[in-house]
Each structure stands twice: as structure tokens, then as C-alpha cells.
Image (tube, coloured by chain):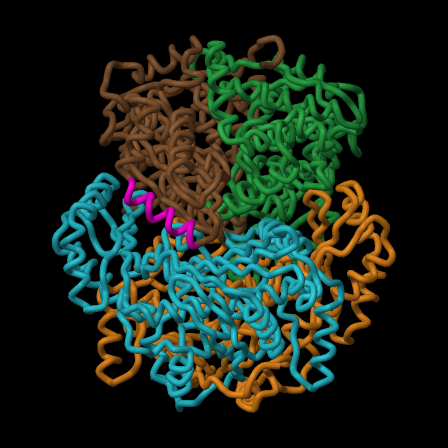
Chain colours: A green, B brown, C orange, D cyan
């Protein structure tokens, strides 16, 4: 089980508050960020301050949620794989019952598949209540796979996970078919606040976003991603709230949109693959319980509502850091200047670009 | 600077020892892993045990190292962008001097560029001693960018980072042009050990690897990645050693190769984008210093050697966890069985698939 | 309308016959290939010969078919985009009626969407009878878009095509959600025929396929593709049958699987995005009519059957050329030797590698 | 060698003239386009007309050229692969001599490599005079591979092509490392011409380009591509000039940039992977010779100049069609209206969206 228990103490601070509205939560809250990169705190803090200066703040819209696990079965041939795939659709009710046996919180909401040669990849999609659901969907997929192998002719075990899920890899399938919470955040910043707080203009941010986040990432051979540093905020928030932080790999695949609207700045971050839970692994640690409680994600609510609240807070935190960094990069030298100042204060520093 | 200082205490254990040889280090060492997902410890531990049973253990070959930052300049037109790009090659010596002013540990080892419309993306490549180098290369890029803007006509500031670096995003450029340490690990496991320790065969692992890691990831729309769960091991190792763990986004883009060699298993993990440092941000925390010292990465050695040692240990740790999980997935139900056992011991569990 | 009408006469030959079975057609047929690269003819011919020597020949399984067009609408905000998206699912019947007005051959079989910021990309999926359907789905999308703009509040015109279709671009969405015919071809070649006709072994082909098509393409940053030269066969077949040959861009994204089954070779090509029609643009040219008739794709059959037949013949043609080239590349120098021989015969030559 | 010789007669017309300037050619020329999709002619024609109304027309800048072939060798282990790779750089002169033996037109200009497990992918980069060079680089790669196998210990034959070239596949490597001609085209269209000829505004085109070509393609999981329909123009031009048209697969991976510059439209198409030749396969057909001559690409010029001229004409043709279609899509219904008009004239039609 591993050696002597110990602890890696990652420095953590609360920043904000930030203001959130939308179809999940209307709230003001500070957010905890655990990181070895201290400039991240003031960066998110600046964005949070701007959200407080605007009305209605960051509007976070949850547009989808599901957790997935793909299994792989080997069929006698493609014809058999195809016949099996057709059965999956006809047996949806039956499959829902099978997966429902592993937990009262799980529900089968979709089944997709893909056939290559004689291989059948089946992607099961579930809702999992307030849990991120990694474990729950694996249990369900195991039950479903066994059920299929027992009741369908011509197929045999391939793998309990076929990498078509996809967990913690940089792929396209999660964004296209959905995995985790899909949250869109939007913030409209009046021209005056852009000038005063960010020392730049909406036009400059919009242009930088097209050139750096869209074109730069495209040239780099990016896959379904166009942002400056979502990974930084996600990691900090995930560690502070007991999430499986390896999910930043796909979680950080998201898209920043910035528009100059007559001098005001429309700024939006879309995170299609945000995997969070308010219960489950890592959530029983004392500091995590404390943090989740302070974020208002341990209330008595209908199943799933605490996790959804957590998701929109995470997404809003990402927007704050993204806005701040992009604004800084519109001004030559600002990033360097900020770091030199922090260094004088004996703070460890690092460019979060 | 953020609110009241606190700490996110991520559970950490030492697992192993594992055996490493190759062009950087010949050693046996335990490795620290900080994670909320406790099944990761025995998973890595099983792989480590196998490395100890073989001779020469995991052979880790460092095949490249460099750290990068891309800047973006806007040119009057494409013709000017092209003229500027040509100057970059002619002025390599001069540019090396400019970047050398920011640190005695930095050296410019390459300059690449790409032109789109009137935009010029310049990717500077450096070695950075024992530091991961994020901060150092940003300082150097800032100096280089200012130098270019002062001395070249027809160009203006675009961004200090053009996302062509690429930092913490899932792209292709890092693997193709290089970023971080590029480490190949190899382990030859005799057939008997495959059977006894992993309860499977080389043929089964090789077939699963092609179907799951290669085909499954390909179908998912993966970009330059074919593995089961590098992200898990990297995150745990990065947190325990004070690394910027958001670099698991690109760090986890790597390739597992498995071959059945007359019953013996040839198993290899290639990590082209492994970003680690033995000094720099996060390294002055007490537990990090302790961990790095215990790993033998705080010795008096030529600049860069401690970081290289850390890189091959990280890569070997990845191999251990990858081997263990793939072996488990060749056997129907093994993963579930292991988790149920752990649960009975009141351990928090989660499928690390 | 352009200048004086002329003709680009692309050299065309019939090769084969090849043998096909499966869920669409059981047939033997020669196939026409128009190309400037003459080595392509003997290459496909060699594969065709092998298909004739085996029983049941190439088994082609059609596993999906649909044609798509995505439209883009701008919503007031993400919340409105989300509300609109939900309406799409509730109004499926109504949308089917609207699209049905443009042709009696079109049927709406799916509606998918994705939201980014305040933008809503809607992907309509149709069956289109015997036509490839580019034009038909654009007409339908236009009608649907107008209908939505008239009947839904808070949205405005973005684009009749939002590139989420995706037509003639290298993306992941077509394979994951489906576009065109999805055809899997399989051929089992006895060991003796592998040795006699291809001068190689199943093991060598399987190993080359993993290393070249899977790993090589992966390292190159490929997206959902693992093959040697599908594009060559598709182009030749498309030109000879009046198809819109620019669809080879996505059509050539496909996957070759090769396995050594006790010395016999299991060889499979999966083409998830095969866009073909037996009627429509380009099909009224005399030579095209002749070719389609000779291929048996102008018979009186239920709507769609002629196009499906054409699709499996196209896919089988791809398999023939792919098998031949991979076999050649297992033998050092064979490709060069073949070309030198062809050159002596005063044939124009080119490596189709 | 295939059956009875025949011809696939693809309808061809000359459109234009269009106006080109830049670092390769200053010229006005009509261009031939062979296609089954007749709306393509007036579409390109409209763009060409606009180029004639502006001064200096389309500015085409050639920023790179090289042709590549990758070989694959298997090494004893990664250590040996690494040692071999290092030798490649040290033996550059020797390798240049070996490749030079196959043709007086070929020159080795770069050697890149990538190591995965014990596999070494070597990517040779050449200039090839006026030929596209597929055949020439394969001959050179064969000579180089044989030379390496003879003179380097510990390696054996893997493949004459390792798919890291990459030929006719949708990947990232070609754009990042270079393959074919890399041409940037730019056109500045005054506001009045945008209004009169395109019935739209620069702002509308710029916004559509970001949303459709950049965001839409990104969401679709595109790899290094952001355009509406480069593939259509490239196919038509390639067929009319005897090119290997299967190269549109990677050739169509390119980037459209559009900006509103105070009402004027800055419009740019970057094609990083444009593979063309004025000599070689397919160029000896009568109509091809005629077309190349009329394009001014059969003049007595220094080696390579005719091919470069052909490349910039191809790229300018792409810009014309791209501009026309994007402009049309800014106006709801325009595309449909145009097609209905064409249909009344009994023209075959198809949406080239």
C-alpha cells in the first residue's frame, strides 16, 4: 500500500471574492487555490475584483454533464461488431438496469460506439450525482461489460477501459461527445474598468486572443483548445478541493472568446470537460471538507447540485486568471515588471504564461 | 497576494525501490508520490518490484533537453515577417549573447519560427541548468523580444507568449521540436516474471497496448499520445518534488510500446515533454528539499545533472505504474477485485484507468 | 461561369477484378482508377488478385451512413444558446418536416450541437438516398436555419456552414459523430498466399503496420488516421466515378489493422468518412455513367442501395492498394526495384509511399 | 499495369485573370481549374476580379520550400537509437553526398529525427528543383537508408517510409517542420470594393472567419487548419496542372486570416504544405504542358523557379475562392440564391461550403 504516510503541503490561499450568476448559482465567494506558483494568486485576484465591479458578474451556464467509461470488446469480425452495436441501442433499458445496480446515484444517459476492424469500442455515459464519478462509472462499466459478454454471442473481453472514455488524455472525443461538466462563463467588462483595472482596451485583448490563443495554439498543433493558462487555475482549484487533479489534462482543453463591443469587453471561457465532485475520493480530508463547506458545496441539496455549484465556481476561477493574464500580455513588459516586484518581496515567482 | 497562507496537504508515500540504469543514472531508489488516489501507490509499487527483479532494471535514455518560450511579433506584412525570420538565423550569436545576460545558467540552443499572414511566431529554445526554466526563459524571451523590436524595422509587439511554446496545452509542437527532457524508458521482463508477478502474458499486454493505447486513443482524437495513465504518476511525482504540476498536460503526452519477444515482455514508455527541475519555484519547501535530497538530486554535480537524474526517475516511475495497470486490464475483473479489497481495508479507492 | 470549356484528361484504367462480400454486396468486379501516378494500377491490381484467391474475399461491412451540415447561430448569450439547443431536441419532428420539404430523398436522422461562448453550432445529420448529398443537406440546412431564426427568440444568423460539418477538412468530428458511409473491410489471407503473392509474412506486415501507420502517424501529429496511402486509391476511384474528389481530405482519415493469426494475415481497413454518390454532380458525364453502370451502381434498387454498393467497392479498392504497399515496404528495396522496372518500360513512375 | 488505357475527362475552364506580386512573381494570369463542381469557377472568378481591381493585387510570399521522406530503422535499444541519431548530425556532409548521387537536382537541406522506444524515425529534407519531388526523395531516402544500414552498427531496416514524412495524411509535422512550398498570400481590399463586389463589410468577414474557420474548425477537432474550402481550389488547380492531387490532403491544411482595417479588408491565406512541380509525373500530358506553358511555368529559368511560380499562382487561386465563399456566407441566403440561379441555366451545381 506504499510506505510511511506523509503529506505534501502545497501552499494554499483564498482569493477573491468573485461574483457569479447563471443557471446554477448566484453567489459571491472567495476561492481556494493551492499552488507552488505564487503569482497565480494575485492574477486570479485581479480578475475576481473585476467580477465584483460588474453586474451581474461572471455568468456561468452549465450546458451539459455526464461521466463516461469506454469498454473494448473483440468481435469475431466487423459484421458481429456491428450486430452487437445495434443491440446496444435496442437494449438501452436493460443496460440502464444493469448499471443502476452499482449505485443509487448513477444513471445511464447515453451509449455511443465506434467500430474499427473487428473491435467494438463502447462508450457508456452516466450521471453520477455529486461525485466526479470515476469509480462509479468503472464499476458500472464492469457490470455492463460482464452482462454483454454473458448475453451476446461472438464477442470477448478486450479491456475494461478502451481509452475512448477518455480519462486524462488530450483528445477530441470528450469535447464532442461530452465528459464532465460543460460550463460556459461570460463576463461583460465596461470600457472604463478595462482601462482602469487592466490598463488595456477591449480591442487589444480581442486581437491578442485571436492571435495567441487561436492562431498560436492552432500552429502548435493543438487539439480543441485555445486558451492561455486554464491548466494553472484548474490545478490550484482541484488540489484545494480534493479533486483528481490529473483531470486537468482534458479539463484545460477549453476556449477563450474575447470581443470588443463598442469599447466594452465581452470575455468568455468555455470549459467542456470539467470533472469535479463534492463527494468521493479526497473529499474526506479535513482541509478539503473545510474548503468545500466554505464554498457552499456541502449543503443539503438535491443530488448533483453541490457538484454543479462547484463546477461553476471552478469555471469562474478559470475566467478570472485567464482575463488577468491576457490583459497583462497586451502590455509589453508588464508581466516581467510584476514579477520583479514580487521578487523584491521575497516571493517565489514564475511566469504563468 | 492572496488571503491567509494555508496548506493543502496531499497524502504522500514513498514506494519502491525501483531499479534504473541508462545514460544518466544507475541507481536504486524509492520514489515519493503525493495523490488523493491511493490505489496509485500499490500500482507503482508492483511495477517497481518487477524492475528490481530484472537486470539491468529500467533503462532510461535521455535523448534531448531544452526549454522554450515563443514570442509573437506583428510585421508590416508577410514579406517583412520573412525578412525578419531570415535575420534571426543570421544573428544567432548576437541573440545568444542577449539571452545570456539574464542568467549564467541559460544558453540559447535553437531558434525556430513560423509565419502566418503578417504574424511571426518565434520559438526560442534554451538549456536552463537544473531549473525547469519557465521563469528563466520568459526573462530571456523578454530580453530577446525587446532587442528585436529595437533593432529590426517593420515589426511591433504581439505577445511575450504566442502559445507556440507550448506551455501546459495539448499540442504537437513540443514533441516534434522538443520541450523539456525527452526520456525513453525500457524494461525487458522475462516470461516467468510476467506470469508470476503480473498474472498475464507478454502477448496479452502487447495486444492490449495496440488496441487500447494506440487505436483507442487514436479513435478518441488524441494528439501525439498513446498511453493508459501517465498523467496519474506524473502528477503524484510532480507534487511530491515541488514541480509545476500543470505541466502534466503536455508531460502526459507519451507513448507506450509493448512487444512479445518470445514470451518475454519488452515494455517501453517514451516521454518527450518531461518538464522538471531540482531548483526553482516550489523547491525550497521543507518536504520538497527532503524528497529531492533522498532522491539524490541535490548533490554537487555539474549544472543540469541533478535535473536530468530527476527526469529519469520520474520517467521510470511512470513506467512502473503504466506496466501495472496495463497488466491488470488484460485480466477481466482484476481491477474491480483489487478495488474491492482495498475498500475492505477502509482505504479510499478509485479506478486509475 | 468561367472561360472556354475544356477537359483535363486524367489517365484511367480498370484493374482487378476484386472479390467482395458482406452486408451490402456479394460481387466480383473490376474497378476504374484515374490517376497521374501509374504505379497505382499494378499496386491495386496485386491486392485485387489476392482477394480473388481467397474465400469469401474482402468482407465489407457498412456500419453507418449519414450526411451532415452544421450551421452557426449567434445567441444573445450562452444561456440563450443553451435554451435554443434544448429546443432543438424537443422539436425534432418539426425540424424533420422542414428539412423534408427540400427533397423527397432526404431524412433528418440526428441533430447535435456544441456551445462556445454565445455561439451555437448545430450539426444536422441526414440520409440522402443515392446522392453524396452535399447540395441536398445545404438546402435543408438553409431551410432549417431560416425556420429557427423565424421561430426562436434571441438568435441571429452566424453562418450557413460553421465548419463543424466538417467538409473537406482534417478533423475528428466526422469519425466520432459520423459523416458519409462508414465501411469496415476485412480480408483473411492464408500464410501461403502471403508468401507467394506478397513475398512476406503476416508477422512482418503486422509489425510494420504498428510502427509505420500507428506510431509514425501518431508522432507526426496525425488526427484519427493510421494508414499508408488511402488518399491515392480514393482519389483515383473518386475521379473515375464522378465524385467530389476534394472529399479525400477526410475520406483518407482511416485505420489499417493487421494481425498475424498463426501465420495467416488478418488485414482490415476502416474508412469512417467515405463520401460517395451514384447520382448528383459529375455523374451525368458519359464516362462516369459508363463506369457507374459497369460497377453495377445504376441498377433499379431501393433508394440508397446503389450508393452503398459504390461505397463498399471504393473501400475494397482502398484495401487492395494498402495491402500491396505495406507488403512491399516490409522488403528492403522492393519499392525501388519495382519502380526501376516500370521506368525501363518507359512508364511514368512515382513512389506511392 | 492495369487494363485498357482510358481517360477520365474532368471539365476544365480558365478563370481570371488574377493579379499577383511578391517575392516570386509579378504577373497577371488566368488559371485553369478542373472540377466536377461548376460553381467553383465563378467563385474563384469573383476573387480574381477583386485582385485585378486592387494594387498590387495578391502579394504572395514564398517563405520556405523542402520535400521530405522519413525512414524508419529499428535499433537494438533506445541507447543505440540515440547514438545513431547523434551520428546523423555529425555525418551531414557525407549524407548529402549520398543523396546527391540520385539526381543532380536534389540537395539535402535538413535531417530531423524522433525516437520512440527502440525505433528511430529519420526525416530527410531536400530541395528538388522544379519537381514536386516525391520520387526523387524516395530514391534518395533509399540510398541513405542503405548507407546507414551498411555503416552503422545496431540498426536494422524498419521501413522506407515511416509516415513521419508525412505524405497525404492530415498531421501536424508538415506545417511545423516544413514540407512543400510554404506560401503566404495577402490582399488588401478597399472598403468600397468590399461593398460593391462582395456586398458585405470587412468587419463581417473578419468576424465570420474567427467564428467559422477558427472556432468551428477547432471544435470539430481540426489539426492545424482554419479555412473554408482550400481543398476545392487546390484539387481543381492540381488536376489541371498534372499534380499528384492526393496531396490536397495536407495541402488544404492552411490558415485564413481576415482583419477589418478601418473598413478595408486585410485578407490572407497561408498554405504551409503546398506540393507542386512543373516537371515530373503527369506533366508530359498534352493539356498539362499547354496549361503549364500558358501559366508561364515552362520558361527557361534557374532550377526551381518555374515550380515556385506555379506555387504562388496556386496559392493566389486559393485566396480568390476562399475570399468569395466567405463573403457569400456573411449574407444569409446568398449561397442558396446563387445556386438556384445557376441551376436555371442548367448548370450542375453544388454548395462548395
Q: Nearer the viewer, residue B307 or C94?
A: B307
Give the magenta range: B79-91
As drawn, is C196 to the left or to the right of B179? left
Residue C99 at x, y = what percent?
79, 67
- Residue B194 against residue A130 in the figure, above or below: below
Where does the image place residue C278, in percent across and percent down from the top left?
61, 80
Position of residue B21 in the picture relative to residue B283 (left or right) = left
Asked where in the image residue C281 lies, by quadrant, the reply is bottom right
Out of C285 and C318, give the one closest to the viewer: C285
Residue D234, percent across and down?
49, 69
**Picture residue at 55% right of the left edge, 56% below the top:** D256
Q: Is residue A282 left or right of residue C106?
A: left
Front position in the image: B192 or D186? D186
Whether residue B81 is in magenta: the answer is yes
Is residue C56 on the magenta stretch? no
Q: Main secondary structure of the magenta part?
A: helix
Q: Residue at point 36% right, 57% down?
A: D64
Residue C240, percent across and down? 50, 82
Amino acid at each position: 500500500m506504499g510506505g510511511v504516510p506523509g503529506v505534501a503541503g502545497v501552499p494554499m490561499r483564498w482569493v477573491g471574492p468573485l461574483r457569479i450568476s447563471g443557471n446554477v448559482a448566484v453567489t459571491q465567494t472567495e476561492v481556494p487555490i493551492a499552488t507552488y506558483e505564487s503569482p497565480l494568486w494575485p492574477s486570479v485576484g485581479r480578475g475576481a475584483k473585476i467580477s465584483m465591479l460588474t453586474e451581474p458578474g461572471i455568468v456561468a451556464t452549465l450546458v451539459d454533464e455526464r461521466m463516461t467509461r469506454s469498454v473494448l470488446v473483440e468481435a469475431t469480425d466487423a459484421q458481429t461488431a456491428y450486430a452487437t452495436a445495434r443491440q446496444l441501442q435496442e437494449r438501452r433499458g436493460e443496460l440502464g438496469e444493469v448499471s443502476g445496480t452499482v449505485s443509487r446515484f448513477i444513471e445511464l444517459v447515453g451509449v455511443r460506439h465506434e467500430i474499427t476492424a473487428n473491435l467494438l469500442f463502447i462508450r457508456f455515459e452516466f450521471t453520477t450525482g455529486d461525485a466526479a464519478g470515476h469509480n462509479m462509472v468503472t464499476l458500472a462499466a464492469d457490470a455492463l461489460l460482464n452482462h454483454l459478454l454473458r448475453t451476446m454471442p461472438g464477442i470477448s473481453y478486450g479491456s475494461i477501459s478502451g481509452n475512448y472514455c477518455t480519462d486524462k488524455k488530450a483528445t477530441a472525443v470528450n469535447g464532442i461527445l461530452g465528459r464532465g461538466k460543460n460550463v460556459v462563463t461570460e463576463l461583460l467588462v465596461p470600457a472604463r474598468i478595462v482601462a482602469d483595472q487592466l490598463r488595456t482596451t477591449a480591442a487589444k485583448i480581442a486581437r491578442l486572443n485571436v492571435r495567441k490563443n487561436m492562431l498560436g495554439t492552432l500552429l502548435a498543433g493543438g487539439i480543441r483548445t485555445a486558451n492561455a493558462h486554464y491548466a494553472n487555475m484548474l490545478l490550484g482549484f482541484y488540489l484545494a478541493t480534493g479533486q483528481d487533479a490529473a483531470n486537468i489534462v482534458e479539463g484545460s482543453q477549453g476556449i477563450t472568446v474575447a470581443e470588443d463591443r463598442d469599447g466594452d469587453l465581452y470575455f468568455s471561457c468555455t470549459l467542456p470537460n470539467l470533472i469535479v465532485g463534492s463527494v468521493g475520493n479526497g473529499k474526506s480530508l479535513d482541509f478539503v471538507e473545510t474548503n468545500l463547506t466554505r464554498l457552499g458545496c456541502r449543503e443539503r441539496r438535491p443530488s448533483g447540485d453541490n457538484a454543479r455549484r462547484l463546477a461553476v465556481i471552478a469555471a469562474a476561477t478559470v475566467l478570472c486568471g485567464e482575463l488577468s493574464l491576457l490583459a497583462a500580455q497586451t502590455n509589453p513588459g508588464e508581466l516581467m515588471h510584476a514579477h520583479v516586484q514580487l521578487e523584491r518581496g521575497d516571493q517565489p515567482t514564475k511566469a504563468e504564461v
